[in-house]
Image: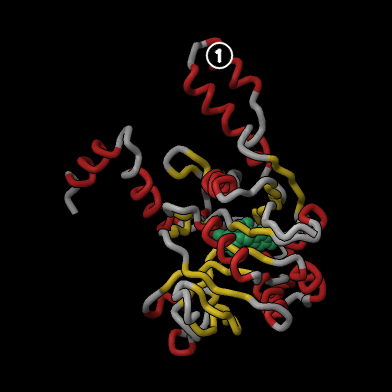
Amino acid sequence: MSNRVRTAVFPAGGQGTRFLPATKVIPKEMLALVDKPIIQYGVEEAIASGIEHIIFVTGRGKGAMEDHFDISYELDATLEKKGKHELLALSRSVSSLARISYVRQKEPLGLGHAVLCAKELVGNEPFAVILPDDVIDAEVPCLKQMIGVFNERGGSVLATQTVEGPGISAYGVLAGAQDAVNPRIYNCTGMVEKPKFEAAPSKQAIIGRYVLTPRVFELLEQTTPGAGGEIQLTDGILALLREEKVFGYTFEGRRFDAGDKFGMLQATVEFALKRPEFADKFRAFLKGLEL
Ligand code: UTP
């Protein structure tokens, strides 16, 4: 068994109801943030973190994702004929980003079930999970930071962000004590899904990045579906916690929930302001708004 984190699983079998009507036909992972589908940000983060193999867990109506990361002969031929070399390079670069495998989740039976669908493709080694909705802007890619913690501590790692106030109730919240050596690390003792503000065990909200040991697959297989027949990843991790060390890690960077309309608007403004080709123009436009 390799102990290197080489594979990243991207669960993309959900229905994206929060973004209707845009997601009636188009998978939410393909919605553009400035000029790239949100899933491409996650793929680029994975590659920049040393990931060699990407597994997309897809479902009905997600074909556009496969086409996006494939070669488009018709588009490339048209761009070549028209001499649009820069655009051609851009189109080609997407298809050569990574080694990608696809596995189908036949029914959206929960995030835990989606991860379990990747079991055979991952094999018996540690792996990452990236929820493509969570787009993270960080100097050192978030997943790279987490793999660093995994390599150093030898246990599964859950990314967290500090949420002050009642907003914490929207998340899975980590229980556990802050590490004495590294204050970004928490020694996880439990997790509570969407607790009331008063009952939240900490301010550490779990977000969509995980580094997990393969034992979680067996534990997910033994997990009985909860409400709505769904298998939750949280339940698998809670079971893992009884056998192995699990760490929370407050990553350095900013996370946007691009699967939500408001989060996507925030991300669009922030990412647009970072683009040298139109940052100045966009800043001037924003300043000119009567707010
Ligand atoms: P979400 O609950 O955020 O995604 O799941 P959703 O169900 O697509 O969106 P809404 O809430 O209806 O708008 C988190 C992640 O888990 C994946 C989703 O694709 C998303 O990346 N997921 C969820 C699956 O792959 N399969 C599932 O059965 C459920």
**Which part of the image, by quadrant, shows the N terminus?**
bottom right
Residue 220 left/right relative to 20 = right
x 52%, y 42%: residue? 37
Give the colour scheme of this rendering.
secondary structure
Of the 4 image quadrants, the one containing the C terminus is bottom left
Measuring 37% from the left and 54% from the top, which residue is drawn there?
A: 266
123 shown above or below 150 = above
- Is 155 left or right of 199, judged from the image as shown? right
In terms of secondary structure, where does tag 1 sit?
helix
Q: Report the residue at 52% width, 83% height from top.
A: 195
Name the amino acid type tagged 1. Glu
Residue 168 rendering spot, x and y as whole percentages = 45, 77
- Position above or below: 91 against 158: above
Q: Is residue 28 visible?
A: no
Q: Quadrant of ligand 1?
A: bottom right
Which quarter of the picture shows residue 279? top left
Residue 3 visible in this rendered orientation of the protein: yes
Q: Nearer the viewer, residue 15 or 175?
A: 175
- Image position, residue 205 (x, y; %): 49, 73
Q: Which residue is mark 1?
A: 80
Q: Position of residue 43 (x, y in %)?
A: 58, 46
Compared across the picture, whether 241 is left or right of 184 comes to right
Q: Is residue 177 above or below residue 222?
A: below
x%, y% of residue 38? 52, 47
